Image: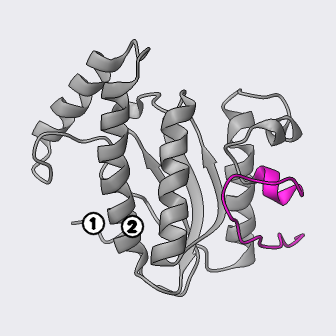
Amino acid sequence: MSTKYKFRKQEQLYFISFSVINWIDLFIRTEYKQIMLESWKYCQQNKGLEIYAWCIMTSHIHMIIGSEEEKLENIMRDMKKHTSLALKAAIKQHPSESRREWMLWMMERAGKKNSQNIDFQLWQQDNHPIELYDNRILNQKLDYIHNNPVIAGFVEKPEDYLNYLYSSARDYSGMPGLVDVILVSPVVL
């Protein structure tokens, strides 16, 4: 087991990324993104998850998180387990999901190949937590999260992405966001 990517210091903030297996573009539907938001809200209220920044891309998610209550690895494990089941059910039930059979087949195939699963896998196995041990790293990851849609070519300028509901860039620009976010003050270097 790798020791490189671990939540080592519970009191620190971490940048995490987690993606759908095979980078499937799952989060093109509002219903699927809403499942993530509801899960985060539950974790905030019941597990002590602190969200400092986030962005839902089509196939993956970036976040800056912390917790003074439950261990981050436990929160992430539970959140990924819950959303995996909820997203699987939503895919099966979505009336116009043209990719349903293909996505479920890919996720069942991935689950059967992974000894840690029984028969289904939605998320890639790890979160790649990176400890944000100084302001330089924190600023870099905050910028990365909020500029990721620009780099991906979804929008031309970062400010265009503020109209996108599924990012904390809105919170950092003074607009209301969809999830409670603890703002960190970026330090000008």
Residue 179 part of the magenta-drawn span:
yes
As drawn, 169 above or below 133: above
Relative to residue 11, is residue 177 drawn left or right? right
**Residue 21 appearing in the image:** no
Residue linked to disc 1: 2
Residue 149 part of the magenta-drawn span:
no
Residue 139: percent from left, percent from top: 75, 65
Q: Residue at x 72, y 72 (%)?
A: 182
Quote the CA–CA distance across marks 2 and 1. Answer: 7 Å
Residue 5's label in the rendered image is 2
State the extent of the magenta-drawn residues as a range: 169-189
**Residue 41 appearing in the image:** yes
Q: Nearer the viewer, residue 29 or 63?
A: 29
Magenta segment main secondary structure: loop
Using a 10 Å C-alpha cutoff, classify the residue at mark 2 as few (fewer than 14 neighbours), some (14 to 19) or many (20 or more).
some
Residue 141: percent from left, percent from top: 67, 60
Q: Amino acid at mark 1?
A: Ser
Residue 76: percent from left, percent from top: 40, 64
Q: Nearer the viewer, residue 77 or 145?
A: 77
Q: Residue at x 75, y 55 (%)?
A: 143
Colouring chosen for the image of the structure: one colour
Quadrant location, the N terminus: bottom left
